[in-house]
Amino acid sequence: MEVHQRYGGVVPELASREHVRAIVPVVREALRQADTRLEDLTAIAVTQGPGLVGSLLVGLTYAKALSFAKGIPLIGVHHLEGHIEAALIGVELAYPALALVVSGGHTHLFECTGQGEYRLEGKTRDDAAGEAYDKVSKLLGLGYPGGPVIDALAARGNPRAVRFTSPKLKGNLSDFSFSGLKTAVLRWTEKRRERGDFDARTDSETIDMLASFQNTVIEELLRRAQAAADRIGAKALVVSGGVAANRGLRAAVAKRQWGIPVYFPEPRWSTDNGVMIALAGTRRWMRGQVSGLDLKAQANLPLAR
Ligand code: KG4
Ligand code: ZN
């Protein structure tokens, strides 16, 4: 994070270099905290994609080496399956279920039709919701990642102070769009700057605008998720991905009448983590779905067939 904060976002080359540097100590520390040894592991789960290919390759190569050296199975996991499974610890999911995955790279709705089976219901046509948070944060000098800081500031503002219009999208009713909202925030910020310098962390107008921005994102996510859930006759809703850590989103979900169970991961397992990959890998392993050593990293790996 410190490396990325300097540039206001993830620089792919730096990310893979940091992965190389961190992977051995991180695995050692994880084993230490779990009071486990490599010898005790039954299988190795690893993210196959999607993501930055340089970073994926570091993890994949390391996992393959471990799998080969210890003679234990390798299990390739889709990043988004990890996010979804993180919400389902101890849960017997009823199908079909709707999964709303909101992160820095994805804003997707999937219909979960069975264990490990997904159908793409809708997705963002431009920016992901988390990306909108990060861009707005950068614009206002609030640092990276933008989600947590905007979440905290938004809690203090008036969500109805600034009216942002929701996008009119033709075609798929389950698609999202956040680039218009980002541009609207840019325009608002330019206007605000014309009246003089301000500190986004303390300026009450900016805090109100951020509350309105967050409210618009949440309303958009939930409106489309609810319509999609009705359309597919969902028996459960799963909300996951980095943006699912958002306190405003959690509160708004709790306030709505869904008529079906709604599952979130614990906040610490909403943003990227290894636990979610281990969980998804365990479920795959239990279904006998292991990978070969020819497993390839895929930057654009789709979740749904
Ligand atoms: O899933 P994740 O950790 O990484 C990706 O797969 O992208 O999601 C990261 C994204 C970032 O855009 C970050 O700003 C956003 O999740 N995020 C949040 C919050 N915490 C993280 N967005 C809104 N509110 C939060 N509390
Ligand atoms: Zn993620």
Image: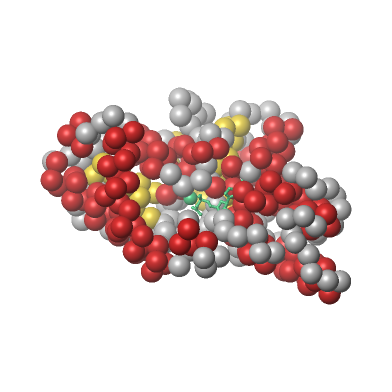
Q: Is 218 placed above or below 197 here?
A: above
Q: Residue at x 51, y 45 (%)?
A: 271
Quadrant position of residue 42: top left
Q: Give coordinates of residue 299: x percent, y percent.
A: 39, 62
Q: Residue at x 78, y 65 (%)?
A: 198
Q: Nearer the viewer, residue 28 or 177?
A: 28
Can residue 25 be seen at all in this image of the molecule? yes
Q: Give coordinates of residue 125: x percent, y percent.
A: 61, 63
Q: Give coordinates of residue 169: x percent, y percent.
A: 71, 61
Left or right of 235: which side holds 85?
left
Left or right of 133: which side holds 284?
left
Q: Give coordinates of residue 21: x percent, y percent.
A: 31, 57
Quadrant position of residue 136: bottom right
Q: Residue at x 69, y 46 (%)?
A: 152
Can residue 81 be seen at all in this image of the molecule? no
Q: Nearer the viewer, residue 97 or 69?
A: 69
Q: Residue at x 35, y 63 (%)?
A: 16
View extreme (bottom): residue: 194
**Count of number-bearing discs:** 0
Quadrant position of residue 186: bottom right
Left or right of 161: which side holds 213?
left
How does the figure colour the protein chain or chains?
A: secondary structure
